[in-house]
């Protein structure tokens, strides 16, 4: 990470049938739990003409326990054939997500997609001393584990958990959701949990 907070993100997703299966595979590393399970609400913003999406850029506001995080991501030139999703990322904490929403709206940005997940964080340090950030995500369309760190460390962790490179998922949740909706013949929608009695 440089002084501006920018860094290169290298990650893959792995799909699991259940949370229990994911935890059993993580125990093979073994990974170390870092944070408890929490609900994350995410809003993806775009300019009125949709320029961010067309150019493969992402502007996202994430809210967890009343605090927020604003993130900007873009593709890294020359990394299209990588075995992982590689993006340049800049992010910053936000004390008031509601105020940030107002700022983004006044600047002309609009919410184009919302998605939710229950996430818990783990870490693992491989035999080479490389640290890997691990996220176990429960989403409305399935259970995923994200491995983020050095490519070689990602590969080592995946092998220990019984996966091959052909199992790597490089799509983001919006793309996975679009494919899921198409498979089930459903119209476009946000990826959110149904919680009766709770405003959306």
Image (cartoon, rainbow, N blue to C red):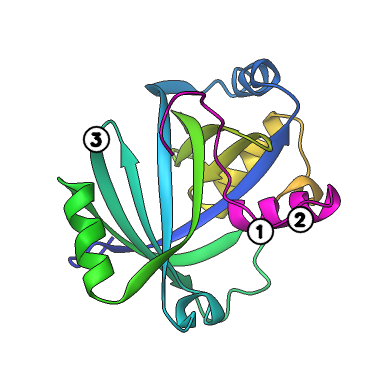
Residue 56 picture location, percent across and down: 53, 75
Residue 16 visible in the shown view: yes
Of 6 and 171, nearer the camera is 171
Badge 3 or badge 1: first in the primary sequence: 3
Q: Is residue 157 above or below residue 114?
A: above
User: Is 143 positioned to the left or the right of 10 in the image?
Assistant: right
- Spot occupied by residue 115 in the image (x, y as percentages of width and height): 51, 46
Q: Disc 2 to disc 3, how far (Cα)?
A: 31 Å
* Closest to the observer, 5 or 126: 5
Determine whether 89 is above or below 75 in the image: above
Crowding at dot 1, Cα within 10 Å, few <14 / some 14-19 / many 20+, comes out as few
- Res 179 label: 2
Q: Residue at x 63, y 45 (%)?
A: 13
Looking at the rendered structure, the secondary structure element under dot 3 is loop
Q: Which x, y percent locates residue 121?
A: 43, 30
Left or right: 3 with respect to 75? left
Task: Look at the image and say whether residue 191 sits in the magenta stretch.
Answer: yes
- Looking at the rendered image, the quarter that the N terminus falls into is bottom left
Residue drawn at point x = 52 percent, y = 75 percent: 53
Q: Nearer the viewer, residue 19 or 46?
A: 46
Instruction: Verify CB contact (< 8 Å) between mark 2 and mark 3.
Output: no
| 74 up-or-down from 129: above or below | below
Q: Measure the C-alpha gap from mark 3 to mark 1.
A: 27 Å
| Residue 125 visible from this viewpoint | no
Q: Which residues are magenta?
A: 171-200
Quadrant for the C terminus, please. top left
Q: Which residue is mark 3?
A: 66
């Amino acid at each position: 990470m440089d002084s501006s907070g920018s860094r290169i993100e290298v990650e893959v997703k792995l799909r699991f049938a259940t949370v229990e299966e994911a935890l059993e595979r993580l125990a093979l590393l073994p990974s170390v739990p870092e944070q408890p399970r929490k609900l994350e609400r995410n809003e993806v913003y775009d300019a009125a003409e949709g320029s961010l999406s067309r150019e493969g850029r992402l502007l996202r506001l994430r809210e967890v326990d009343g605090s927020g995080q604003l993130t900007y991501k873009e593709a890294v030139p020359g990394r299209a054939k990588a075995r992982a999703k590689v993006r340049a990322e800049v992010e910053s904490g936000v004390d008031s997500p509601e105020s940030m929403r107002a700022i983004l709206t006044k600047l002309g940005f609009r919410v184009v997609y919302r998605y939710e997940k229950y996430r818990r964080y783990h870490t693992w340090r491989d035999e080479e001393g490389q640290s890997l950030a691990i996220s176990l995500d429960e989403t409305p369309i399935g259970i995923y584990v994200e491995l983020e760190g050095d490519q070689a460390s990602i590969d080592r962790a995946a092998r220990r958990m019984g996966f091959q490179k052909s199992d790597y998922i490089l799509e983001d949740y919006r793309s996975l959701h679009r494919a899921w909706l198409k498979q089930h013949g459903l119209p476009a929608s946000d990826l959110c949990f149904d919680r009766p009695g709770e405003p959306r």
